[in-house]
């Protein structure tokens, strides 16, 4: 049995069958650069790992390299599955940043910023495996290409689609002059997925990310950010009579607007009850003390479960403590937060009362930055976003990670959330 057949057999035992397309990619991935791209849960990562294992056994002499955005994500996305396939006897952790697989020394590197290229500068490698390539700085990948100096060296990698102007797409995947093979997959190419799981994944993404992560398309972020928000579906005239919980979320500003949102939660749905919106540039700057007093008036008569605050608003956080209000630093991951917010809107779990005119205006005017998009970057224009930032803080903090309620902290009975939140989904599908 060949090394590839042996790896396929071991992977089948652990992860299930391979599609005909996956098997074909294993036999055809003999170019200098071999990239598996496409939707989430399409089988591209396991397929690429199997090909990498086969290469480890037969690669030219020399050190090998494995790269992720961070070493932690590399372990989560790739190394744990690699170890499961080859077995513990053939996988050893040699030290910090090194493993040994079938007797071959492999360096492990995280490529999360421009400085990452220094980690491989001067090195010589006989092969490289790259997880989630679109998340690397271009400078790192350019340096990596120059380090594959051993005769017969090859690179194997995976990626989800991004902007069609991303450096990987423009300079490599679309470059016909390169010795490169691209293998494209969608969820329909994975024979091991339960239909209910496929349905759950399709519901987890919307708009831009549905096109990229489900359909496997390289599309640019353009137009209104929250194009799933519709007045006739999400703007309401009447609120429920009661709520299970009340939250306040805040985006602090001095010249820029300072925003408070009071949100009620009922039956796993969110209702924006009212907003406070003061724009210092137009209406005059106010002190932290003024805003703290306004917040107290804003929340009078409501039992607030938790206050979420812009994590950079340290002075306002201190002022609120003086008034007996303790805040939680909101999760300010912009893109993941937008994805989660868009998903909640698309699921019809967010409703805005018609009196909240500022956030309703922002929904129609918060747009993607077209100039950034043409550079391969997903960025919203930094305007018309203050109330929407506050909304994102709350929704992503509550559903993107687990945060206990005040009552749970007070009784010291904090329990681990079992909700399948976006971060858990993301871990499962990378």
Image (cartoon, rainbow, N blue to C red):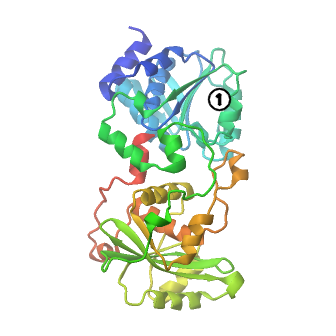
Q: Which of 241 and 45 is in front in this view?
A: 241
Res 220 → quadrant: top right
From the viewer's perspective, is residue 26 above or below residue 393? Answer: above
Give SS at disc 1.
helix
Q: Is residue 311 in sight in this rendering?
A: no
From the viewer's perspective, is residue 245 above or below residue 319? Answer: above
Q: Nearer the viewer, residue 85 or 255?
A: 255
From the viewer's perspective, is residue 391 above or below residue 20? Answer: below
Which residue occupies the extreme top position in the image? 1
Q: Where is residue 372 in the image (x, y as percent from the top left)?
A: 70, 51
Q: Classify residue 262 as left or right of residue 359.
A: left
Res 284 → quadrant: bottom right
Q: How many numbered marks are there?
A: 1
Q: In which quarter of the image is the N terminus?
A: top left
From the viewer's perspective, is residue 407 above or below residue 338? Answer: below
Res 47 → quadrant: top left
Image point 37% across, 85% down: which residue?
302
Q: Where is residue 421 in the image (x, y as percent from the top left)?
A: 38, 54
Q: Where is residue 75 in the image (x, y as percent from the top left)?
A: 45, 39
Q: Classify residue 184 as left or right of residue 14.
A: right
Q: Classify residue 40 as left or right of residue 418.
A: right
Q: Nearer the viewer, residue 43 or 270?
A: 270
Image point 45% across, 49% down: which residue?
205
Q: Is residue 9 in sight in this rendering?
A: yes
Residue beneath disc 1? 173
Q: In which quarter of the image is the C terminus?
A: top left
**For the residue carrying disc 1, how many other residues have a C-alpha within 10 Å: few (<14), some (14-19), or many (20+)?**
some
Q: Where is residue 31 in the image (x, y as percent from the top left)?
A: 61, 17
Q: Which of 92 and 84 is in front in this view?
A: 84
């Amino acid at each position: 049995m060949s090394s590839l057949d042996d790896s396929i057999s071991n992977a089948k035992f652990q992860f299930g069958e391979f599609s005909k397309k996956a098997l074909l990619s294993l036999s055809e991935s003999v170019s200098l650069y071999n990239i598996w791209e496409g939707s989430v849960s399409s089988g591209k990562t396991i397929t690429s790992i199997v090909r990498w294992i086969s290469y480890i056994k037969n690669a030219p002499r020399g050190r090998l390299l494995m790269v992720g955005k961070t070493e932690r994500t590399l372990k989560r996305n790739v190394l744990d599955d690699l170890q499961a396939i080859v077995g513990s006897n053939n996988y050893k952790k040699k030290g910090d940043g090194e493993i040994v697989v079938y007797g071959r020394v492999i360096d492990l590197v995280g490529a999360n910023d421009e400085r990452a290229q220094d980690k491989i500068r001067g090195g010589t490698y006989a092969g490289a495996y790259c997880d989630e390539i679109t998340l690397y700085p271009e400078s790192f990948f350019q340096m990596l290409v120059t380090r594959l100096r051993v005769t017969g060296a090859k690179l194997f990698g995976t990626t989800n689609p991004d902007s069609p102007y991303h450096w990987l797409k423009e300079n490599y995947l679309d470059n016909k002059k390169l010795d490169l093979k691209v293998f494209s997959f969608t969820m329909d190419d994975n024979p091991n997925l339960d239909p209910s799981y496929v349905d759950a994944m399709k519901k987890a993404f919307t708009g831009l990310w549905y096109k990229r992560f489900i359909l496997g398309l390289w599309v640019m972020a353009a137009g209104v950010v929250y194009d799933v928000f519709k007045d006739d579906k999400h703007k309401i005239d009447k609120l429920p009579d009661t709520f299970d919980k009340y939250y306040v979320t805040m985006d602090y500003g001095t010249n820029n607007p300072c925003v408070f949102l009071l949100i009620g939660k009922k039956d796993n749905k969110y209702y924006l009850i009212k907003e406070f919106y003061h724009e210092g540039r137009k209406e005059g700057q106010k002190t932290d003390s003024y805003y703290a007093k306004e917040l107290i008036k804003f929340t009078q008569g409501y039992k607030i479960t938790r206050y979420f605050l812009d994590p950079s608003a340290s002075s306002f956080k201190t002022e609120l403590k003086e008034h007996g209000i303790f805040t939680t630093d909101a999760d300010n991951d912009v893109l993941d937060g937008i994805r989660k917010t868009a998903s909640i809107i698309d699921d019809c779990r967010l409703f805005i009362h018609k009196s909240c005119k500022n956030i309703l205006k922002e929904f129609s005017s918060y747009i993607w930055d077209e100039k950034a998009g043409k550079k391969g970057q997903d960025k919203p224009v930094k305007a018309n976003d203050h109330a929407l930032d506050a909304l994102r803080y709350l929704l992503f903090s509550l559903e993107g990670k687990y945060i206990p309620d005040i009552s749970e902290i007070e009784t010291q009975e904090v329990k681990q959330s079992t909700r399948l939140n976006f971060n858990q989904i993301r871990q499962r599908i990378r």
